[in-house]
Structures are given as C-alpha cells and as structure tokens.
Amino acid sequence: MTDLIFREDAYLRETEATVTGITPEGGVILDRTVFYPTGGGQPGDNGMLSWSNGALTIATTIKGENDGVILVPAEASALPAVGTKVTQTLDWERRYRHMRIHTALHLLSVVIPLPVTGGSISAEKGRLDFDMPEAPEDKDALIETLNTLIERDLPVNDAWITDEELAANPGLVKTMSVTPPIGSGRVRLVRIGEGAQQIDLQPCGGTHVARTSEIGRVRIGKIEKKGRQNRRVNLFLDD
C-alpha cells in the first residue's frame, strides 16, 4: 500500500520516499508518493526520481495491486534497489494545469446540471460528455456563467463519507459511466464553496486547486454530438 500524499497536499511538488518494490515490467513502487496515478479521467503524473547515485525520468503513474502506486520510467534504465531512499519531483506545470482543468470541469457540471456520461482531462483541455439530447442554445451565456463562478474565488476542499452514506445519497454521483471507488469503507467527496455558498459536492479522487479563482478564465470550445442522447463539451484554459 502506498501513502497517497497528494490527497493531503495537492501542492507538494517534491518529497522523499523509500522504494518498496520493483514490478516485473520495471515500474517503481514507493512507500509514499506525490504522483497521482491515472484514474477518473485524470492522467497519471510525470516527473523525476533521483537518489544518491542515479536518476530516472518518470513518464506516467498508474495504479497497482493492493492500493499500490507504480511510477513508470520513460525508458529502460538502472533502477533503485528496494530500500533505497529517493527524491520524487513532479512535473508541476503539467500537474497544476490538470488541477485547474479538473476543478473547472466540476464547475461545468454545475452550469450544465445534467447526468455526465464521460470525461477526460489533459494539460491542454478537458471535456465532459452529458446526457443532453440537444446542444445548449446560448454557448456564450454558459461561458459567462462558468467564469462568474470561477471569479467568486470559492474554496475547494474535501470530506469523507462511508460507503453506506454514499449508497443512501445516490444524488451525489453525477457520472453515469464512472462508479466512485467504494469497498474501502469510505469515499472522498470534493466540495466547492462552503455553507450557504456551497455549489457542488460530488465523489472524486483527483487533485484540485484550493480556490476557484486559481483556474483563471476558461472558454468552451466545440460542442460535439456523440450519439442520439450525448453531447461532448470541450473546455480550455485561456492561458
């Protein structure tokens, strides 16, 4: 099991860890990590792993068995032995864009309050697919509403509920295609806004900015038809 430091501090860019395993494919498993593994539409992090007599470029990060996280090297290279103390360093610019886009997509699901049938995130853009038979009539109004929410500088934080509490509140789940991770006894929720100012609360395991203003202005690109009932809404950061 890997301690998921990014859950506690999504802004930590570098930290030390100990190698606890090497996979047959050459992946590196650490006892604790700031690297987010691919999941929920968010790509795995990349960056560097270094130790006293070596270094390794990490191309991506994936989930392993028994709640482990595997750092995947960009190319075959000498690997640190089990027990080695290493320093892990994120490609922070890429990760931070993922965080900004991910939070923006949560806000998009507020502006378009329809069931979500799919989604993905990259450093360049994000998208959500909605159960939406007809495209929105006024895309410009959607963009303005979305940017107004961003400019409110709402806090973004998380909370935890039990599997049973989630089962008793199915309305928390907006995604039709992705089931929230259950089975461990508790589920992480991401909240945007607090108290009377709360505008969104939904299960999510990804990384987010601390306040909506960090997203910056966004724009909505092409709204594509993806089947009889589905529309794909593409979202871009302005910088």
Image (cartoon, grey):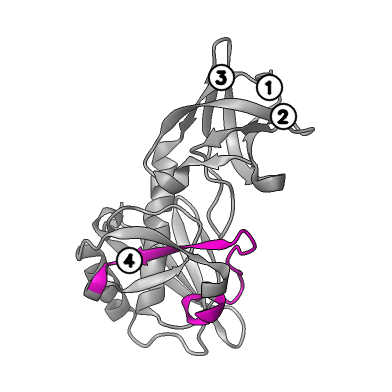
Q: Earlier in the sequence, mark 4 or mark 2?
A: 2
Measured as percent of width and height from the top left, residue 110 is found at: 37, 76
Which residue is identified by label 1?
Answer: 82
Q: Nearer the viewer, mark 1 or mark 2?
A: 1
Contact, mark 1 vs mark 4 (Cβ under 8 Å): no
Q: Earlier in the sequence, mark 3 or mark 4?
A: 3
Please tell me how crowded label 3 is: few (under 14), some (14-19), or many (20+) other residues with Cα within 10 Å: some
In the picture, measured across the screen, residue 138 lies left or right of residue 202, that is: left
Per the model, the C-alpha gap separating discs 3 and 4 is 37 Å
What residue is shown with label 3?
A: 85
Residue at left 50%, top 80%? 169
Q: Position of residue 57 (x, y in %)?
A: 57, 27
* Quarter of the rendering containing residue 81: top right
- Which of disc 4 and disc 1 is earlier in sequence? 1
Query: Element type at marker 1?
Result: loop
Tell me the residue at 45%/35% (across/down): 91
Q: Which residues are magenta?
A: 167-195
Q: Please tell me whether residue 12 belongs to the stretch shown in magenta.
A: no
Name the residue beneath numbered marker 4. 192
Q: Nearer the viewer, residue 16 or 113?
A: 16
Measured Cα–Cα span from mark 1 to mark 4: 40 Å
Measure the C-alpha gap from mark 4 to mark 2: 38 Å
Residue beneath the point at 54% across and 40% down: 3
The quadrant of the rendering that contains the N terminus is top right
**Mark 2: secondary structure:** strand
Residue 192: give x, y in percent of width and height.
Answer: 32, 66
Disc 4 secondary structure class:
strand
